[in-house]
């Protein structure tokens, strides 16, 4: 069976409810959905409030449990899911659009998509004008066509007909962005990819009131735990949606107050209405028993209030009582609610029914009894996706897959790419980082490699990110490839056969050393040994500690960097034991002055450095001397005209005593 399942195009739907999550898996069979598996799990804590997701991780955990149980039952993996957004903060707008063609034309799907797109854009414009002071962004989550006209003649469908003047009226539904995005966040956290998105009342309507019944003035009221969604149809079309902010939780909370029980116990008591006695344990730990009729009476006021609010919303959107009304959702199963709603609407009780009797028009199952009003939304989501009832005029392909699409006004290719996880770096790429180093006092900059630009094809032609996209468009996008950062070694700069010595940030290093941003490189004519493990063993006897007045001066050349670390290569133990090295010509000089490392850039004329060149760097005011000064080079008395060598230890300080 597992192998068979893998070969099937399965429809996987999740109904993310305030109280529980219901999963349905099915497949299309001869214009109907065959339901293969159903799983349900309640939230362990109140992770949702009035249909809005509050705790993303907790809701995702339950969604994952339901998915795993369905996978085990069917022996296959489920990765793409169809979902519906709750009707909380739902807003509907009507839109009308006329498309006049230059000549009589046979109408195909593309023309219908353009027509519907125009009508939805008009609805969006109406929404924007009504919400000028509202900064929240709203997303289009669904729409239904209420009527078509061809050359001013009403038709149920335009496809295949010929004419010049096409008109369409739509009812578009919008939700605040946070409602939709939290739903996508839950699915991502559960490891699922959203295959389609619709609105819960639209989905439930497709299960409860199939299109063939919509000539009548019918109303669907889906009573969940936190909200009651309402959809109205007549004359063959859906004419409006709305929502009441009262639902089954009002009954549960009333039971909590009356009988001092927790939420779960109150939920169970609500389900047991109609039995003889209801046994429960209150928050004091005492077991109680109460007649069911007494509990029914206790919640009668809350139930009547719920019925009155539903009736008020139905009258407001429908203009009066409908011909018939269907109650769906878990909250609709409250004992006596059907009669209360009929009374509030002044309708014959026989014209108010629990949903479920019409499910078999669009769905069936060999294993499950489907005529449960609680299945309206999960079945509706699956039926809507499986039978192509979700408005697909705004489906856009991105790299061959249906794009995640939150329509909100005019849509550009950039908008769509951002909605589907791409960033500005993917669009523009990133040039590799530059490498800047200083060599012998001269700053050098090496440029990083440029990015390979992104490519964007809209319907096979090159396009810019600002290009508008429309229904049925196909986008192929290849992200930019960032350029490599600049990188150089000393050998790249100086040549692999460079004969002299090199320090980087004061450390003698080999030519294979890779450079980093900000490195200070000094070159010397004389090669020297790389720093040994125990540097102190090769250094001369420590020079006298500098007095506080002796402050190492900053090099005169502004390009030279500040004093370098003291980790330097060894110096000769005695100047007399080695022949004096020739002064560097055109090279930098590295010495110690009063115990601090000092890098001296090469003189412009290539001449040597003398001891007197360092007098101004010692911090002593030689124009106003008031006591003797010690001048030492490698522990020996020095002369003003003494030529300095690499790694000399120099002391210029006031004499002690």
Image (cartoon, helix red, strand yellow):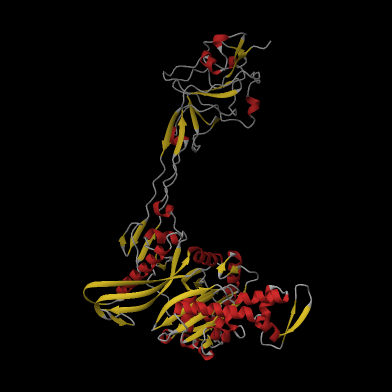
Query: Which corner quadrant holds the N terminus?
Result: bottom right
Extreme left residue here? 103
Say if 387 sits above or below 357 in the image.
above
Q: Position of residue 161 (x, y in %)?
A: 27, 81
Say if 243 sits above or below 356 in the image.
above
Between 328 and 641, the one lying in front of the other is 328
Say if 175 sits above or below 553 in the image.
below
Query: Which corner quadrant holds the C terminus?
Result: top right
Q: Position of residue 181 (x, y in %)?
A: 50, 64
Task: Report the number of discs.
Answer: 0
Q: Which quadrant of the view contains residue 651?
A: top right
Between 133 and 173, the one lying in front of the other is 133
Residue 497 relative to residue 465: left or right: right
Q: Position of residue 209 (x, y in %)?
A: 46, 84
Between 325 and 610, the one lying in front of the other is 325
Q: Position of residue 40 (x, y in %)?
A: 60, 77
Q: Is residue 203 visible?
A: no
Residue at image coords 66%, 84%: 273
Q: Which quadrant of the view contains residue 38?
A: bottom right
Extreme right residue here? 286
Q: Is residue 173 visible?
A: yes
């Amino acid at each position: 069976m597992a192998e068979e399942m893998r070969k099937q195009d399965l429809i996987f739907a999740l109904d993310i409810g305030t109280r529980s999550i219901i999963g349905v898996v099915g497949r299309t069979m001869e214009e109907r959905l065959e339901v293969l598996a159903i799983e349900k799990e309640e939230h362990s804590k109140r992770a949702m409030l009035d249909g809005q997701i509050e705790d993303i991780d907790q809701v995702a955990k339950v969604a994952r449990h339901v998915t795993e149980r369905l996978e085990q039952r069917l022996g296959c993996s489920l990765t793409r899911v169809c979902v519906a957004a709750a009707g909380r903060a739902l807003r509907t707008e009507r839109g009308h659009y006329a498309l006049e063609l230059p000549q009589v034309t046979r109408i195909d799907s593309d023309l219908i998509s353009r027509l519907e797109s125009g009508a939805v854009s008009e609805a969006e414009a109406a929404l924007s004008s009504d919400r000028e002071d509202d900064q929240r962004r709203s997303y289009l989550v669904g729409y239904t066509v209420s009527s078509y006209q061809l050359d001013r003649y009403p038709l149920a469908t335009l496809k295949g007909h010929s004419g010049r003047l096409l008109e369409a009226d739509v009812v578009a539904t919008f939700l605040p962005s946070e409602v939709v995005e939290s739903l996508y966040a839950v699915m991502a956290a559960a490891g699922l990819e959203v295959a389609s998105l619709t609105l819960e009342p639209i989905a439930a309507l497709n299960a409860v009131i199939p299109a063939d019944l919509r000539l009548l003035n019918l109303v669907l009221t889906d009573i969940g735990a936190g909200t009651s969604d309402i959809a109205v149809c007549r004359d063959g079309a859906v004419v409006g949606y709305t929502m009441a902010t009262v639902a089954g939780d009002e009954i549960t909370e009333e039971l909590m107050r009356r009988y001092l029980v927790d939420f779960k116990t109150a939920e169970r008591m609500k389900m047991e209405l109609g039995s003889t006695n209801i046994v429960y344990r209150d928050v004091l730990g005492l077991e109680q028993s109460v007649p069911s009729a007494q509990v029914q009476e206790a919640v009668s006021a809350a139930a009547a209030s719920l019925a009155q609010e539903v009736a008020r919303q139905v009258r407001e959107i429908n203009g009066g009582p409908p011909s018939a009304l269907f109650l769906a959702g878990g909250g609709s199963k409250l004992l006596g609610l059907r009669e209360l709603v009929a009374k509030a609407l002044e309708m014959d009780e026989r014209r108010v029914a629990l949903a479920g009797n019409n499910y078999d028009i669009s769905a069936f199952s060999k294993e499950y009894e489907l005529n449960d009003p609680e299945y309206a939304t999960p079945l509706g989501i699956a039926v809507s996706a499986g039978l192509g009832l979700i408005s697909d005029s705004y489906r856009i392909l991105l790299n061959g897959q249906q794009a995640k699409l939150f329509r909100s006004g005019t849509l550009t290719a950039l908008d769509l790419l951002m909605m589907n996880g791409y960033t500005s770096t993917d669009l523009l790429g990133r040039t590799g980082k530059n490498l800047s180093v200083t060599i012998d006092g001269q700053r050098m900059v090496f440029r990083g490699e440029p990015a390979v630009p992104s490519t964007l094809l809209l319907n096979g032609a090159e396009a810019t990110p600002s290009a508008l996209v429309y229904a049925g468009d196909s986008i192929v996008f290849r992200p930019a490839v960032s350029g490599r950062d600049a990188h150089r070694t000393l050998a790249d700069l100086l040549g692999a056969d460079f004969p002299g010595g090199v320090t980087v940030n004061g450390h003698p290093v080999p030519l294979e050393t890779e450079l980093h941003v900000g490195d200070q490189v000094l070159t010397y004519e004389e090669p020297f040994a790389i720093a040994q493990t125990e540097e102190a063993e090769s250094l001369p006897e420590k020079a006298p500690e500098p007095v506080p007045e002796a402050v190492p001066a900053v090099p005169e050349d502004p390009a030279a960097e500040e004093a370098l670390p003291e980790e330097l290569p060894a110096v000769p133990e005695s100047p007399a034991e080695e022949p004096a090295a020739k002064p560097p010509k055109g090279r930098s000089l590295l010495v110690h002055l009063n115990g601090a490392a000092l890098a001296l850039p090469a003189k412009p004329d290539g001449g040597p450095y003398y001891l007197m060149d360092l007098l101004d760097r010692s911090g002593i005011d030689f124009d106003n001397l008031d006591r003797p000064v010690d001048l030492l080079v490698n522990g020996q008395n020095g002369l003003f005209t003494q030529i300095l060598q690499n790694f000399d230890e120099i002391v210029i300080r006031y004499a002690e005593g």
